[in-house]
Image: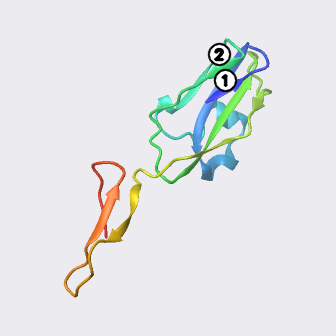
Amino acid sequence: IAFTARAPVGRFFVLLAAEANADNLDIPGTKVFAHAVGDGTCRREGFLSTNETEVDLFGCHLVGRQQYAAFVYIEDSANRDDGSLAVPLNVTVPPSRDFDSQPFLYSTPTLAEVNIEVSPNASPSKVWA
């Protein structure tokens, strides 16, 4: 997540929360990482040293096809909760697996069997039919 502060002095807080909890986060909640998902490496706080800041979040344990919201809050060094909370960023996680091509019948079905060809985009994959 990258952001630019107007002044290069102060603190920042960044976290990911499930979309269902996005409406429940305010400035005090963001500063204590309320509703944050993942490990401690999936939330960050630090000091602004330049106007432009990049923050990498990892260990988030996100689930495919789920919606999350990223929160970024910046304030000066006075710690009075009077800074700026950015509009939450929508984060959509793609499915854990997808098809290279859609499944199809590769032979005429009979009373005893149906043959379907499936091409997942990664291995190993599990298939249920």
Callout 2–callout 1 Cβ contact below 8 Å: yes
How far from the left and from the top, in percent, is residue 108? 27, 81
Quarter of the image for residue 55 reads top right
Numbered disc 1: secondary structure: strand
Asked if residue 75 lies left or right of residue 105, the reply is right
Please indicate, yes or no, whether residue 33 appears anywhere in the rendered image: no
Question: Vertically, is 87 above or below 92?
Answer: above
Question: Vertically, is 53 above or below 61?
Answer: above
How far from the left and from the top, in percent, is residue 20? 61, 53
Residue occupying image coordinates x 31% and y 70%: 129
Numbered disc 2: secondary structure: strand
Quarter of the image for residue 12 reads top right
Front one among 4 and 73: 4
Q: Amino acid at mark 2?
A: Phe
Q: Residues within 10 Å of mark 1 (few under 14, many from 20)?
A: many
Q: Residues within 10 Å of mark 2 (few under 14, many from 20)?
A: some
Residue occupying image coordinates x 60% and y 39%: 34
Please indicate, yes or no, whether residue 60 appears anywhere in the rendered image: yes
Q: Amino acid at mark 1?
A: Phe
Q: CA distance from mark 2 to mark 1?
A: 6 Å
Residue lying at the far left in this picture: please name it.
112
Mark 2 or mark 1, earlier in chain: 1
> The N terminus appears in which quarter of the rendering?
top right
Asked if residue 63 lies left or right of residue 17, the reply is left
State the count of labels: 2
How far from the left and from the top, in percent, is residue 76? 76, 18
Q: How is the image coloured?
A: rainbow
* Residue at the spot of label 2: 47
* Residue at the spot of label 1: 12
Question: Vertically, is 106 above or below 99?
Answer: below
